[in-house]
Amino acid sequence: MTDDLTPFVDTLVAAVRDRRATSPLTDSRELDEPTALRVQDAVVRARIDAGATLVGAKLGLTSAAKQRQMKVDRPLYGWLTDDMQVDTGAAVLCERYIQPRVEPEIAFLLGRDLEGPQVTAAHVLAATEAVFGAVDILDSRYAGYAFTFNDVVADNASSAGFVLGGTPLDPYGVDLRLTGCVLEKNGELVSTAAGAAVMGHPAAAVAWLVRALAARGRGLAGGQVVMAGGLTEAVAVAPGDTVVATFDRLGSVEIPFR
Ligand code: OOG
Ligand code: MG
């Protein structure tokens, strides 16, 4: 276990502030998973100290498509703050980011607290107020998104922005396994998927998160948003691009990038 986290945290906080990518932390020093999680906590705390509010969590690398793309073979999680949320339909300025990418996801708004080592997908659905079609805006702080598992954990799972669609549904009114998703960029089809792409069911992915948090004595709170992980590979965006993620029954999320 590395004791002095400061150099790791400073590197990541500076990369966000200066919008300049850095090399993976593991290039210069050893970084084990418990330490990476503590760096993640410190990076999130730095945002909160700067005035942001914790509003939820995100899963990452929950689909085969994402694991293949990022060459990381297990899921992870990170945290969402209010300053990351972008209104549906709003334009997004690429200059706010280093190397933005987007990916379509299913998001959960929790109606009550959710914690414990035995939580299942059924518990997640019972605790959910509404489900949304959503888009995750990623911005790895590592040049070219080249990272190891522990690097990306430390970097708060590349969290940078998220958009919730405008057509939420009652989770009992929709079979999220079958929720189809079509991702288009500039009018061209990029990829397609269904909800089952993330751990068999988006609620199963959220249950995995709750159990992982329970192992650290933590949980999720009512009112929090949870993103279940990219259904498809992420796609790079630049000024002038428009991305549309269309979900069966959950509407579409359109993001014009400037
Ligand atoms: C890591 C973040 C992964 C997802 O949904 O898979 C993630 C990355 O791809 O940079 O958010
Ligand atoms: Mg994601």
Image (cartoon, helix red, strand yellow):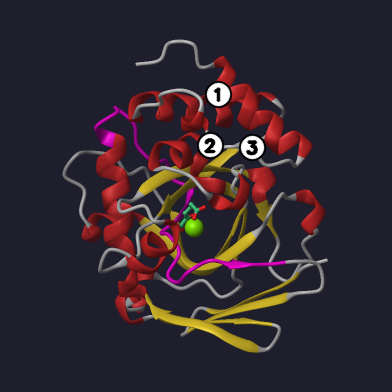
| Proximity of marks 3 and 1: CB atoms separated by less than 8 Å | no
Q: Which residue is mark 2?
A: 24
Q: Earlier in the sequence, mark 2 or mark 1?
A: 1
Q: Which residue is mark 1?
A: 8
- What is the quadrant of the N terminus in the image? top left
Q: Residue 221: x percent and y percent?
A: 42, 41
CA gap between label 2 and label 1 equals 10 Å
Element under disc 3: loop
Q: Is residue 235 placed above or below 190 in the rendered structure?
A: above
Q: Amino acid at mark 3?
A: Thr
Residue 72 as seen in the image, left or right of residue 230: left
The circle on residue 22 is: 3
Element under disc 1: helix
Highlighted magenta segment, given as a residue range: 214-237
Q: Nearer the viewer, residue 231 or 120?
A: 231
Callout 1 crowding tier (Cα within 10 Å): few <14, some 14–19, many ≥20:
many
Q: Earlier in the sequence, mark 3 or mark 1?
A: 1
CA gap between label 3 and label 1 equals 11 Å
Q: Is residue 15 placed above or below 29 in the rendered structure?
A: below
Q: Is residue 234 magenta?
A: yes
| Proximity of marks 2 and 3: CB atoms separated by less than 8 Å | yes
Q: Residue 76: x percent and y percent?
A: 37, 46
Who's the residue at 26% across and 35% down the image?
Answer: 214
Whether residue 126 is visible to the viewer of this picture, yes or no, is no
Q: Amino acid at mark 2?
A: Pro
Whether residue 140 is visible to the viewer of this picture, yes or no, is yes
Q: Residue 86: x percent and y percent?
A: 69, 58
Callout 2 crowding tier (Cα within 10 Å): few <14, some 14–19, many ≥20:
many
Residue at far front of view: 27
Q: Amino acid at mark 1?
A: Phe
> Residue 228 falls in which quadrant of the image?
bottom left
